[in-house]
Image (spheres, rainbow, N blue to C red):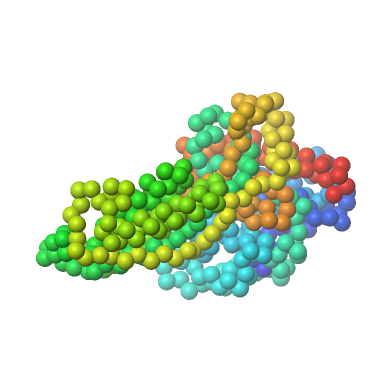
Amino acid sequence: MGQVHTDAMGNQFAIRPGLSNDAPPTYAGSHLDTQPTGGRYDGILGVTAAVEVLKVLNDNWVETNYPIGVVNWTNEEGARFPMSMVSSGVWAGSIPLEKAHGTKSVIPANDTATMKSELERIGYLGSVPASHEATPMAAHFELHIEQGPILEAEQRRIGVVEGVQSYKWFTCTVKGRDSHTGATSFQHRADALLTASKMILASHKIAAKHNALASTGILGLKPGSTNTVPGFVQFSLDIRAPQDETVQAVEEECKSAFSALAADEDVLNINAGCVPSSRQCSVEWKTDFVSPATHFHRDCINCVTEAGRDLCGSGEVQGKDIGAWGKLMTSGAGHDSVYTSKWCPTSMIFVPCREGVSHNPREYSSPDACADGANVLLGAVLRFDKLRGERGQ
């Protein structure tokens, strides 16, 4: 008989026994939560495929050396409760339980709920501690849509994920001075919105120089009147790259450039064509989240690769390409596998999604792509279980 439990962060675990049950299970899973505008595959595919793995094992009377488990991680997206991968982070000991439980809802606006109060309300505040000690894992495999266009563009069926790129989130606050749009000339404005716009453009240019990414997804201003030059702007900045050092370099260059732009100094020719002003703005940075680069375990990567070969045919590795069917990849997005990799061997499997669209109602992976991913997930889990048996743990 399998075991099911829910921990103090609402993470759900289901375990199918093996021949030997005195060691942690090999897990497969992902998350079921999504973004405000949806997406029916991001995370959800990984959980439903993991459940299908257990069903296939049961239907075919497959005996594994050790237990096989399914995990559904809570609030991976950080959409309603703005701390991404929070529940796997608590499990890993990287995020304090009190901080996670106290995180306040931002959807809808002015909501007073916290993660703990909502878990209590829906009956998912489990009694099992949310920790890698209370629920240990021997390995973690996560099937996921790519959330990018590469696999589809290259007509490849499987992405073998070697790691997750580094990223940092910041909130930048630009302060100028509210003034009348008709009575205040360009030469006498401290225009916080114009200055913030220049900063966002600078972040793009600096990131491009380093083969990195810089993005702004949230922007707010005050006072918000058609005939008032904004004196206050706050915007988010998301910097990502495969290496921690690259993210650090982009951050440092952006900080220098933002300070110069706030002082109405030219950077990267951004002020070309703009009227100089005698008044200046100020800029402040706040670091919201840091996720260092993650490198997955070679045993798990090999299990995924060999399972891909079993399904798609042989293929030699040339650069990042695996024959005509696969590709070694670094994930551009954060995943729960980032935190599981701190305590157990981990890897991920990517499948193509249409036009690379994600976090959007149009997010879609074909039934064939989903089946490919589920088959590779099954093969990788069984290969790792066999490897454990051969090594005696």
| Horizontal relation, residue 113 to residue 130: left or right | left
The quadrant of the image that shows the N terminus is: bottom right
Q: Is residue 57 above or below residue 14?
A: above
Write the residue at 67% across / 40% down: 374
| Horizontal relation, residue 328 to residue 36: left or right | right
What x and y, as percent, mark residue 348? Answer: 64, 44
What x and y, as percent, mark residue 11? Answer: 66, 61
The answer to whether residue 378 shows anywhere in this view is no
Which is more toward the observer, 234 or 385? 234
What x and y, as percent, mark residue 335? Answer: 59, 52
| Horizontal relation, residue 109 to residue 148: left or right | left
Write the residue at 54% across / 28% down: 155
Which is more toward the observer, 144 or 113? 144
Write the residue at 52% across / 61% down: 289
Which is more toward the observer, 46 or 242? 242
The answer to whether residue 377 shows anywhere in this view is yes
Q: Is residue 207 above or below residue 322?
A: below
Write the residue at 46% across / 42% down: 211
**Residue, far left:** 183
